[in-house]
Image (tube, helix red, strand yellow):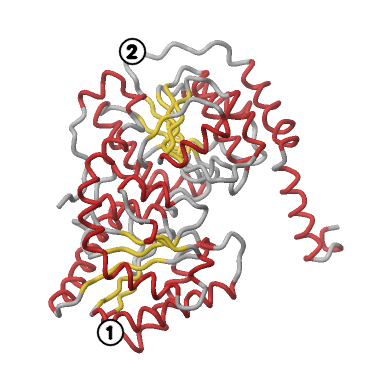
Amino acid sequence: MKQLIPVPVRRQLRGWLNSAKNTPFAVDLLELRRWQIARKDVGVNAAPRNNPRRLLVLPSDPWSIHQSRGDEAMIEAAAGEMKRAYPDLEIYIVTATAAASADVRAMGFKPLELWKQPFSYETVAQELSITRPDFGVILGADVLDGYYSPVDAARMLLVADLMAAFGAKVSVLGFSFNSRPAKALREVFRLIDPGVVLNLRDAISLRRFDDFARKRARLVADAAFMLTPRADTDAVKAIATTIARQRAQGRKVFVFNIHPMLFKKPEPAKLRKMIELAAGAMERLSRQHNVSWVLLAHDYRPEIADDNCLRPLADRLKPTLGEHVHHVEQTLSAGEIKAVVGLVDGVITGRMHLAIAALGQGTPVAAITYQDKFQGLFAHFGISEQLLLSPAQFLNGDSFEQFVAHFLGTYEAAGDQVRQALPDVMELSRANIAPLLGDSAIRMAPEAGGKVA
């Protein structure tokens, strides 16, 4: 039957089905009602244990946890802080596939493969009744406003509710909330257990969320600020040597990053134009400002991997810039990436968590922003929005070149501002897990890996 339907028609049908699935009616029928059936069997919230033993983490992408360095950074940062308070804590990560479960084991955690298709709240409830987590951490990131999928956002929130129903202390790590949230999620936010602590990672997102959901929430900074950099690996040492060689020539060194998700839909022509504009500007500015470039990926998921843009950019720049451009081809961990961005003068990036890694090291950032989520991050540091550029602006004439030139002229002052604000931002980052720790928070040391000059 499938072969009888032309491929374009099948794609159009899939698009219609996905659109229908994400409507308020479908979310109510397919998610809320099924969740209510599962929730009814849980009963009254169970009392938490005196000796907590288990933490359950729900990532924003249970299919490819290890390939998203943003998720990895938030998981390791939150898990590390929890382990400092409870050294014997068992940490489980929710996964959707056997491959994701293998990645979780490689990270040193235990997989709980309950995000399978077809998705079932009753199956989730059964697994929770067996695992009985004492703590739950939800990686809200940039998905809980429904930008990518209202259904996936609803499921994450309703599973957080189920965790709370089984007696876990649950914190939704600081997430962004864009200016056009999915209306289907309003009722979901209204219904989830009040014990689920909702954290917004910037003041702009908090204001939008308050207007949308009328639900109590807290201001934090992104949990990934707590991540400890890993500077002791062979990969980082090799990159450090390359950077040192450029500095010995009197050159400034900047990390550069662009990626396919700067455009919501796959648009090869726009990506090719972006790469060409970037290459031309970087060649000219390298000569004018004595700058060298490190092309650094932060996401390795095959279809949206940063190297899908950075590799052709490197090929374009190498003939003219030679050793003054270095494409990092190794696959680095989140901790290694954070160490690398602590070695350079500045970072220009389209990845939110690469920006967070840099800012957490006191390194100034200019961002190619999408989903209007960088504004709130920059507001934490009082950084001018002149250091933000939209993808549409990027493609407009010489706007990108002027943007980078402005950053090269102001990065030192921006860096001073970042380092001055960083201690307060670190405190806001730790606030993500404070609701889980209660009195145990006093056991935690104030530092959480990062360079502050």
Q: Secondary structure at mark 1?
A: helix
Residue drawn at x 37%, y 61% as measured from the top left = 387
Residue drawn at x 69%, y 43% as measured from the top left = 22
Checking the image for residue 380, the label placed there is none
Q: Amino acid at mark 1?
A: Arg
Q: Decide: few, some or many residues near mark 2? Use Cα within 10 Å; few <14, some 14-19, many ≥20.
A: few
Q: Decide: few, some or many residues near mark 1? Use Cα within 10 Å; few <14, some 14-19, many ≥20.
A: few
Which residue, as the protein is rendered here, is positioned at the far bottom? 319
Q: Secondary structure at mark 2?
A: loop
* Closer-to-camera residue (133/70): 70
Q: Nearer the viewer, mark 1 or mark 2?
A: 1
User: In which quadrant is the N terminus drawn?
Assistant: bottom right
Q: Position of residue 330 (x, y in %)?
A: 34, 66
- The span from disc 1 to disc 2 (Cα, nearest Å) is 63 Å
Q: Position of residue 416 (x, y in %)?
A: 20, 55
Q: Quadrant of residue 266?
A: bottom right
Of callouts 1 and 2, which one flags the residue occurring earlier in the amino acid sequence?
Answer: 2
* Closer-to-camera residue (56/225): 225
Residue at the disc numbered 2: 50
Q: Quadrant of residue 437?
A: top left
With respect to residue 146, does 335 lie above or below?
below
Left or right of residue 76: residue 265: right
Q: Quadrant of residue 52?
A: top left
Residue drawn at x 57%, y 30% as measured from the top left = 213
With respect to residue 438, does 105 lie above or below?
below
Q: Position of residue 131 (x, y in %)?
A: 47, 24
Residue at the disc numbered 1: 287
